[in-house]
Amino acid sequence: MTTEVLASRPATRGDAWWLTPLVIWQAVYAAAAALATGLVVARTGIVITGTPRLVAIGILGLITLFAALSVPWIIRRNHRGRLAAFLLNLVLAVGAGFLTLQETNVFNGLDALGGTFGRGIPFLALMAVGWLIAGWAGKVTGPTARALRLAARWLVIIGLALLLIRVGLLPGVWTFLTRLVQPAALTPAAVAVVASLWTRILLSDEPNPIFRSTKAQLEIMDGLFFVSPNVLGFLAFLAGPLAFSLFVSFTDWDGLSEAAWVGISNYTDLVTDPFFLKSLRNILYFGVLAVPLSVLPALGLAALLNTKMPGMKFFRALYFLPAVAGVVGVALIWKQLYNATVGYINYGLVRLWDLINLLPGLDLAPPQPQWLSSPSTAMLSMVIVFSFSTIGLNTVLFLAGLQSVPGDLYEAAELDGAGPWAKFRRITIPMLAPTTVFVVITTTILALQLFSEPFILNAPQLSPNGPGNATLTPVIYLYQNAFERFNQGYASAIGWALFLLIFAITIVYFRTQRDRGVLST
């Protein structure tokens, strides 16, 4: 990547009108962040307690540091000052904008809009008609085209106006504006506007000669700007909570009061916790049964669906249906099927045994398993439901892998006299090895995180633990500690222990497949 300087002429303080205001703004930014940090540390005016207070102190401290460093960097025309100011103002614009929306109650308004949006569907259809007419106008010429474009424009305008009126958006906009002029919302809104302007200026080409920015540095800034929505979302909703949960796992915290640091005692308690050890045994037993039953039938179905037999498209959609039906709906259906007295599974067993008893000399009593209420069959019931829900997706993945296998290999095998089974064993399975690795890993991760099936199938007669804790899993135990006993520290330790188990199994499997030559290093 080139490091060519885009402009190397000497930069003076008068090169841009905005340079001195930027220095002042960054100094005020640093002072405000330092003041906020001090208020949180002193617990004055800002009511934040417990672990969130420590996190806020850390974040505000970093912002204060970089905002303070950006001031001398900008004065010396160092590109680091431009980059730091750009990132800090981008974050400030997003944060202040979010606070503005919160103060104006926009999010509740969007919920209300969702409830009334159905009223505007006819007018949305009117706008769609206008759009279609506009497309039709592009295929004709002369006065007819002009008339069609005019009609399309008015249809869209009228439809949009009626849509806004019908769903109640215009009153909502007025309410938003009246709330926006209140000091609680106007202040963050003004900060968001100013920070957005600085972000725009710093991202433009005008500062290039002042900071002597290179093409490589500008590409980095552009890249950071374009990935900022994903990065901020990742930090706010994934990386941030993960780091927070890791910290909480070393504390004794109920989610409300001050967190007490306990070190690794939560993890040492897991080693001797009989319920956690029981959940580990259950989930490993579940994984040993569920993963093969979710992968092997999917491979066979994919091989069948890859043929050119009539109706294959219908069967592909049919087998994939459980994957999109939703866990709750599928589990409720299976709960009825598992009913020991009126369920169709036990009814089918009775009818099957009636047929068997037609044989001379046989009078066998039909089995009536207590699928969900017996410790010996409760986990097996979960295995069946899980496999039923995941076979469809795995079949689609295998089918995609099968369609990438070169047909020349099968033709050459047929010339050598190979039969269907030989081609499947010698060509299909080896060529599907990378797909198989992916399917097995993803299915294993899903299996070790089992939660929904026991939670739904056992309710309301039994707890999610099932009879004799037969369906207790680490995620269920985590849920109970976090949201029933409010032991957030211990629950976080359970989550990280499960993560380490999944990570270890994944690494071992990857290394095994790499040693076999399936995966490239």
Image (cartoon, rainbow, N blue to C red):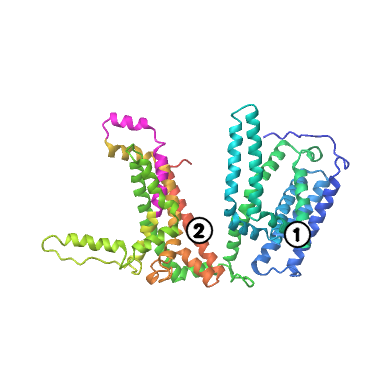
Residue placed at 69% from the left, 41% from the top?
A: 222
Give the magenta range. Answer: 389-418
Q: Which residue is mark 1?
A: 178
Q: Nearer the viewer, residue 316 or 195?
A: 316
Question: Which quadrant is home to the N terminus?
Answer: top right
In contact (CB < 8 Å): disc 2 and disc 1: no
Q: Is residue 504 visible?
A: yes
Q: Nearer the viewer, residue 204 or 262?
A: 204
Q: Amino acid at mark 2?
A: Phe
Residue placed at 66% from the left, 43% from the top?
A: 157
| Disc 2, SS | helix
The x, y position of residue 258, in whole percent, is: 64, 72
The x, y position of residue 408, in whole percent, is: 36, 30
Packing grade of label 1 (10 A; few <14, some 14-19, many >=20) is few
Q: From the viewer's perspective, is 507 left or right of 54? A: left
Give the alpha-carbon distance from disc 2 to disc 1, as whole Å.
48 Å
Please identify the quarter of the rendering in which residue 346 is found.
Answer: bottom left
Q: Is residue 498 magenta?
A: no
Please identify the quarter of the rendering in which residue 360 is found.
Answer: bottom left
The x, y position of residue 410, in whole percent, is: 33, 33
Q: Amino acid at mark 1?
A: Thr
Count all numbered tags in the image, as a single digit: 2
Q: From the viewer's perspective, is 160 left or right of 33? A: left
| Disc 1, SS | helix
Packing grade of label 2 (10 A; few <14, some 14-19, many >=20) is some
Q: Is residue 399 magenta?
A: yes
Magenta-drawn stretch, dominant element (helix, strand or loop): helix
Q: From the viewer's perspective, is 192 left or right of 314? A: right
Residue placed at 64% from the left, 34% from the top?
A: 149
> Looking at the rendered structure, which numbered label has been put on residue 499?
2
Mark closest to the chain's N terminus, 2 or 1: 1
Residue furthest left in the image: 360
